[in-house]
Image (cartoon, rainbow, N blue to C red):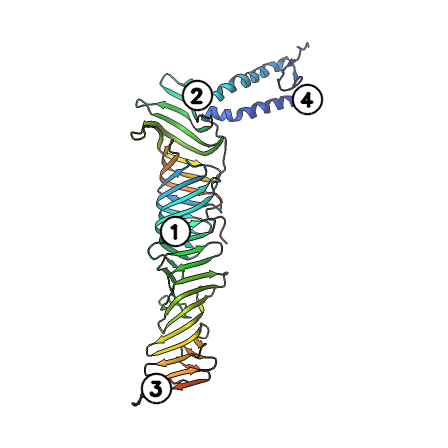
């Protein structure tokens, strides 16, 4: 009986205190928040620092938070700096869209993107970097500039599209010096895929022009393969390939440059070399191979054609084997 | 020792006796009953009041609490403070402030700050009364997903806007881009 009485007392007290806990807070704090929250900080959180913030919650379906002045957003995926940023949240307070304006700088694992404007859409996972010549730079100094509408990067697939790209890459095998010359590649469109940590591929399409210290290459499509250190290890040029050096021009349907051998193989559609004096070298076999280091040239099943002229023209400086 | 007859508490929603006890326990039972049936309604009722019940002779309020509801009775926001004072200019100065804004019946945003000044003015264009709270003190605005801290804020009550003016830090739980880096 005593036990039952005590138990009943406990139930009664529990009932009373359960009723009065919020009121107790009300008595001391003046009001009882119906919802208590934990601190949201964690490793997967995004932290945004700024001078000024404006939170608009008038729309229950959509929240708009505007940041101004020295905005720095640190996310698990990337870091963003800009002068002004607008973040849109849905009714669940999930961010759906981020707009960054003025002096936008995005950085991720050694790569930096700069532009006037960046838009992130969570539904698609894409970031569009635009404005005046948005630029991406990696830790090796390789640089991609969009001369068109901008750079679109998908943070999920790690795929990147660049409109009217201009890409500066180092094609030399010597990675020790930062003063190595760049190869600049321009095109109508660049599609960049980072398949994994070992390999990434940049595909240029439409009016591709690659200007190297040694030669200039024009084609319709070019595929540049990078190794894990973002070093070019293979370049493939397709369709209407035209390579020029001072005094020489090579034409074919395909050209492949291998970094390991430092050789360019021109093939497809009867690859032909022509010099300024009119001498021609045509390969009817596997193609023409040119070593960029030794300057030696070999041609498979080749025909050497001299110009038809009354005067005696000098022989080409590099006679094919 | 002679025992007094048992005291019995009946609850209308229950049949029969809830508990039996003896005379020495009557006093706490009575106190608790009084607390339930008298204090609770008073304290709940204060939410809709203007804290007039705690006004002192100096014009200061203690345990200041005001809740605003729309015509349907749904809460819009509530402002509370440990202490409040009406200034000669008509503005309310509040200390240890806790603000809740509501979305439906649920608390939407919580705001806490050591001090703020609550005021209202008539907009010359719209002829509407607009209320605002300003402070130079530190502020924390938070809900389950988002936490905002900073120094100095401006709360435009009718426009549903919080403006934090200095050293803003916002933490979004779960990340904006949606998870940890691969």
Q: Residues within 10 Å of mark 1 (few under 14, many from 20)?
A: many
Label 2, label 3: how far apart the Cα atoms are: 105 Å
Q: Disc 4 marks which residue?
A: A4
| Residue lying furthest top | B2
Q: Residues within 10 Å of mark 2 (few under 14, many from 20)?
A: some
- Say left or right for B93 vs B47: left
Label 2, label 1: how far apart the Cα atoms are: 49 Å
Q: Nearer the viewer, residue B62 or A277?
A: A277
Q: Disc 1 marks which residue?
A: A118
For the residues bearing labels 2 and 3, Cβ distance under 8 angstroms:
no
Q: Residues within 10 Å of mark 3 (few under 14, many from 20)?
A: few
Label 1, label 4: how far apart the Cα atoms are: 68 Å
Residue at 48 percent of width and 20 percent of height: B45
Chain label for disc 3: A
- Dividing the picture into quadrants, the one containing residue A313 is bottom left
First in sequence: mark 1 vs mark 3: 1
- Dividing the picture into quadrants, the one containing residue A175 is bottom left
Q: Nearer the viewer, mark 2 or mark 1?
A: 1
- The answer as to whether the residues below labels 2 and 1 share one chain is no
- Say left or right for B64 vs B30: left
Q: Nearer the viewer, mark 2 or mark 3?
A: 3
Quadrant location, the N terminus of chain B: top right
Label 4, label 2: how far apart the Cα atoms are: 42 Å
Q: In the figure, B177 relative to A151: above or below?
A: above
């Amino acid at each position: 009986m005593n036990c039952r009485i005590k138990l009943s007392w406990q139930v009664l007290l529990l009932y009373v205190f359960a009723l009065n806990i919020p009121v107790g807070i009300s008595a001391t704090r003046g009001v009882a928040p119906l919802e208590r929250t934990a601190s949201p900080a964690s490793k997967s959180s995004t932290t945004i620092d700024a001078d000024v913030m404006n939170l608009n919650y008038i729309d229950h379906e959509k929240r708009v938070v505007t940041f101004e002045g020295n905005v720095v957003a640190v996310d698990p995926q990337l870091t963003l700096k800009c002068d002004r940023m607008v973040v849109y949240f849905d009714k669940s307070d999930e961010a759906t869209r981020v707009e960054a304006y003025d002096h936008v700088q995005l950085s991720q694992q050694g790569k930096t993107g700069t532009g006037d404007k960046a838009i992130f859409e969570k539904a698609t996972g894409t970031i569009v970097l635009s404005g005046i010549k948005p630029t991406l730079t990696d830790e090796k100094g390789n640089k991609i500039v969009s001369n068109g509408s901008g750079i679109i990067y998908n943070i999920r697939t790690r795929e990147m599209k660049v409109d009217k790209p201009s890409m500066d890459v180092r094609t030399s095998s010597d990675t020790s010096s930062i003063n190595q010359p760049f190869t600049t590649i321009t095109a109508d469109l660049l599609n960049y895929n980072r398949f994994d940590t070992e390999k990434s591929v940049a595909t240029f399409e439409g009016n591709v022009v690659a200007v190297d210290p040694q030669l200039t290459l024009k084609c319709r499509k070019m595929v540049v393969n990078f190794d894990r250190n973002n070093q070019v290890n293979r370049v493939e040029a397709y369709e209407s390939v035209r390579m020029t050096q001072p005094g020489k021009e090579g034409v074919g349907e395909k050209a492949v440059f291998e970094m390991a051998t430092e050789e360019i193989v021109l093939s497809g559609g009867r690859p032909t070399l022509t010099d300024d004096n009119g001498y021609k070298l045509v390969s009817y076999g596997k193609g023409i191979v040119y070593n960029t280091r030794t300057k030696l040239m070999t041609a498979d099943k080749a025909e050497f054609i001299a110009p038809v002229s009354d005067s005696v023209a000098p022989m080409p400086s590099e006679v094919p084997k | 020792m002679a025992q007094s007859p048992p005291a019995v508490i009946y609850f209308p929603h229950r049949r029969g006796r809830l508990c039996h006890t003896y005379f020495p326990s009557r006093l706490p039972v009575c106190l608790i009953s009084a607390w339930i049936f008298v204090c609770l309604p008073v304290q709940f009722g204060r939410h809709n009041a203007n804290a007039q019940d705690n006004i002192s002779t100096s014009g200061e309020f203690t345990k200041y609490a005001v809740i605003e509801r729309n015509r349907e009775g749904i809460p819009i926001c509530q402002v509370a403070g440990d202490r409040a004072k009406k200034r000669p200019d008509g503005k309310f100065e509040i200390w240890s402030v806790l603000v809740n804004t509501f979305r439906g019946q649920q608390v939407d945003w919580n705001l806490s700050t050591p001090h703020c000044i609550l005021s209202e003015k008539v907009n010359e264009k719209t002829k509407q009364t607009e209320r605002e709270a300003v402070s130079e003190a530190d502020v924390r605005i938070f809900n389950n997903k988002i936490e905002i801290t900073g120094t100095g804020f401006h709360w435009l009550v009718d426009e549903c806007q919080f403006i934090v003016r200095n050293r803003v830090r916002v933490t979004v739980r779960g990340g904006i881009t949606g998870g940890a880096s691969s």
